[in-house]
Image (cartoon, coloured by chain):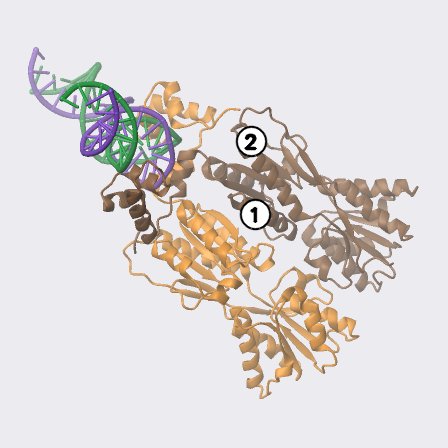
Chain colours: A brown, B orange, C green, D purple
Amino acid sequence: MKQKVTLKQIAKELDVSISTVSKALKDSVEISLDTRQKVKAFAKLYNYKPNNIALSLKNRKTKTIGVIIPEIVHHFFTTVIGGVEKVANEKGYNVIICSSNNSFDKEVINLEMLASGSADGFILSVAKETQQKKDYHHIEETMSQGMPVVLFDRIIDELVCDKVIIDDGKGAQTATNHLLSLGCKKIAILTTVDYISVGKLRTNGYLRALRAYDITAREDYILKIEDIDNCEVEISEFLQNKDVDAIFAVNELFAVTAARVLNDQGKKVPDDVSIVGFTDGILSKHFIPSLTTISQHGEEMGIRAAKLLIDKLEGEEDVPEEYKTVIIDTSLIQRQSTKK
Amino acid sequence: MKQKVTLKQIAKELDVSISTVSKALKDSVEISLDTRQKVKAFAKLYNYKPNNIALSLKNRKTKTIGVIIPEIVHHFFTTVIGGVEKVANEKGYNVIICSSNNSFDKEVINLEMLASGSADGFILSVAKETQQKKDYHHIEETMSQGMPVVLFDRIIDELVCDKVIIDDGKGAQTATNHLLSLGCKKIAILTTVDYISVGKLRTNGYLRALRAYDITAREDYILKIEDIDNCEVEISEFLQNKDVDAIFAVNELFAVTAARVLNDQGKKVPDDVSIVGFTDGILSKHFIPSLTTISQHGEEMGIRAAKLLIDKLEGEEDVPEEYKTVIIDTSLIQRQSTKK
DNA sequence: TAACCTTACTCAAACGTTTGCGTGTGGATA
DNA sequence: TATCCACACGCAAACGTTTGAGTAAGGTTA
């Protein structure tokens, strides 16, 4: 099992110094053409590849972007990663992905691990637990050590850094408006508990849309789902004998679960009840009926986040810090779950 | 913006040598208790974290596992990653994920990049293009440089290394048998073109099951889908006026698309046609009707793959090489898309 | 032939760690 | 007071790379 070949070994074989080899490989004029060719031939033969670790240590940069997301088995987050990878690869950066699994502790561990040498900067969406605890010391610390952080989707207002978000409120308003424009009057919302920032923002958007139409929001039309894994039960009870003509769900899962429940309760989508979801994932696309939904343009978010980060990474050191918040436009995708 | 603190800085502040600081932090008896406490207090105050890069260089190992998958926006692969992460984190390993995007070139680039210092070993599922090209030099090279590789799901028979797979043929046979046992006689299969190894294996399993039931397979019951993104058209034409009572689809997407097409053609699932899919993803679970399918136990695959890799990584150097192929059992998950 | 310039290299430091070995100081022993 | 030992610490090399500065050999110029 041959080991990886280093400059030192090439130098020894060719009976020159390490620096000569290094310079020869870089086509330095300092080195004679003859030697250059010899070294290169040898390097090629032995398939020499410079050791990234040594380079990172020397250059004090890793050319690696750390991405930390709450869940890896999640369509939206993976599309964002897709966008990040696109830009990163173009600009010669590597991407390390870690999942916090929505655990505060794991988020801290991952961040600290990556921060201690593995990545130059971070793109992250915080864990649910972190949003609850409101403990952001790990992120602040990372930034104070000079590593830029870009927050996306589930951001933290208190933190001063670059951010990429969608206008959740506006998206929700668009969704609700769509239902209203179709003539729906009794619109329920399936949302999350308040500490999930995006859930709350979307709920607010829904309320604003109703107000703009002079419709009084009704408490009993709002369901804040506690346990996502068990949402079918909650939704089923909520919808039981409820006279609604439309549902706005703040995510895909709630939307399809609602469709399923309605189906079980003998109601037709969209004939009896229209549904609009949020997030344009696999489910929305392939469900029957396919779901009208709000697209968050995850890939675009990833692209923008990566660009922001790389700009910071490659920007001048002494430029006064300036942080941007990019708001990605959402768009309404009309499909079959809302009547025409 | 305070920079990251190093041993050197602590040493300077405390007016001791770097080695003293290093030893003190490791609680070496060589260092007086007094100094040890002073150093530790200082390190804590300045939040000292050893630089992983320097450690990697010194130890010639990174404690990092590289995972390369064909697609990141893919439920099955992300569940596998989930399993890998679980084991890796337990054992103190970091996980770097890269996506090849089903491109041979990107697979090569990613592998070479990670192999040149960023990871100690790899878990990988090869890109479609790689399967077509049958060019595995990058993987062979990586292994010949002493870095262990574990292949999963889309493996390469020719390569001598650890592998984790499911018995695709057996799974397909189980699926087909299930349909047969329900009394279905005219069973179509929606599969991929032959160069996708798992597609071919599953097709073979289907054929074996039919043979065991003494049913002659019919060419016109087999659809090898070329363009996945456009499968709806192909499936729709295929199913047009075809008298089938069951469909076995080799993946989730084909299964739901078939359901959609049948729905459009006015046929009921499962009353007119039963459907069994492959892969237990989001779609299968939430579709209406929910899909009977073959679960591949992705997380389990990840767990096993990570264990195999770490065993190799931490095993004795001089132990004769021995490679295992772990076969994960599939299971049939009965839901609503097949009649009772 | 002394002074100088090119050419083609080598040296050494640096990045941040770890660790075996060397060493100066002080006290205890003979 | 000479010898020894323990203690507490520093030195230096190593991991693999880059790069500015130094240098030897040979040729050119005056």
Given residues B59 and A43, the one toward you in this image is A43
Left-right relation of A284 to D15: right
Residue A98 visible, this orientation: no
Counting from the top left corner in percent of width and height, residue B173 is at 56, 77
Residue in view at x 42 percent, y 38 percent: A56
Which residue in the structure is indicated by mark 2? Answer: A315
User: What amino acid type should be assigned to the residue bearing mark 2?
Assistant: Gly
Based on the displayed image, in which of its 4 quarters is residue A158 positioned? top right
Mark found first going from the N terminus, 2 or 1: 1
Left-right relation of B82 to A335: left
Given residues B118 and C12, the one toward you in this image is C12
Residue in view at x 43 percent, y 26 percent: B43
Read off the chain for label 2: A
Tell me the CA gap for discs 2 and 1: 20 Å
User: What amino acid type should be assigned to the residue bearing mark 1?
Assistant: Glu
Residue A95 visible, this orientation: yes
Counting from the top left corner in percent of width and height, residue A163 is at 65, 36
Which residue in the structure is indicated by mark 1? Answer: A85
Q: Tag 2: Cα neighbours inside 10 Å, few (<14), some, or many (≥20)?
A: few
Read off the chain for label 1: A
Given residues B228 and B263, the one toward you in this image is B228
In what element is the residue under mark 1? helix
